[in-house]
Image (cartoon, helix red, strand yellow):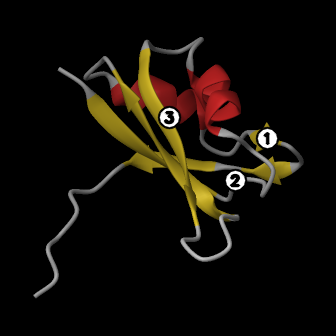
Amino acid sequence: MSKTLYVGNLPWAVTDDQLQDVFSPYAEVIAARVITDRETGRSRGFGFVEVATDDLDTIIRSLNGTSLGGREISVNEAKERQMRM
């Protein structure tokens, strides 16, 4: 079963591949995606990483607060997206 992590405070220049490289030593990464602005295509400073493990605590403890590109990233379990009515 896979789980998704939210990664915040990303440097603007981080790519999907770089995000995957950061998490791959800790778990098998299924997908990594930096969220971009629809109009400009520029990073919005956060992303999501889907990993093939249920043990997120180890990953979160290892990476939350670490430096990536000069910025201290935040790593949390992603919350389910709620539908807007």
Q: Secondary structure at mark 3?
A: strand
Name the disc covering residue 13, or none: none
Three-letter amino acid code at the position of disc 3? Ala
Tell me what residue is drawn at x 74 percent, y 44 percent.
14
Q: Quadrant of the C terminus?
A: bottom left
Tell me how far mark 3 sits from mark 2, CA to CA: 13 Å
Location of residue 77 by image quarter:
top left
Tell me how far mark 1 sits from mark 3, CA to CA: 15 Å
The residue singled out by tag 1 in the image is 68
Name the disc covering residue 32, or none: 3
Location of residue 17 by image quarter:
top right
Q: Earlier in the sequence, mark 3 or mark 2?
A: 2
Q: Secondary structure at mark 1?
A: strand
Above or below, comparing residue 41 to residue 78 in the picture = below
Farthest residue toward the left? 85
Q: Position of residue 26 (x, y in %)?
A: 53, 15
Q: Position of residue 64 (x, y in %)?
A: 60, 42
Q: Viewer-nearest of labels 3 and 2?
A: 3
Q: Position of residue 25 (x, y in %)?
A: 59, 11
The residue singled out by tag 2 in the image is 10
Residue 18 shown left or right of residue 56 in the figure = right
Q: Secondary structure at mark 2?
A: loop
Tell me what residue is drawn at x 86 percent, y 43 percent.
69
Count of all numbered marks drawn on residues in the image: 3
Tell me how far mark 2 sits from mark 1, CA to CA: 7 Å
Kindly indicate whether the residue at mark 1 contacts the one at mark 2 (C-beta within 8 angstroms).
yes
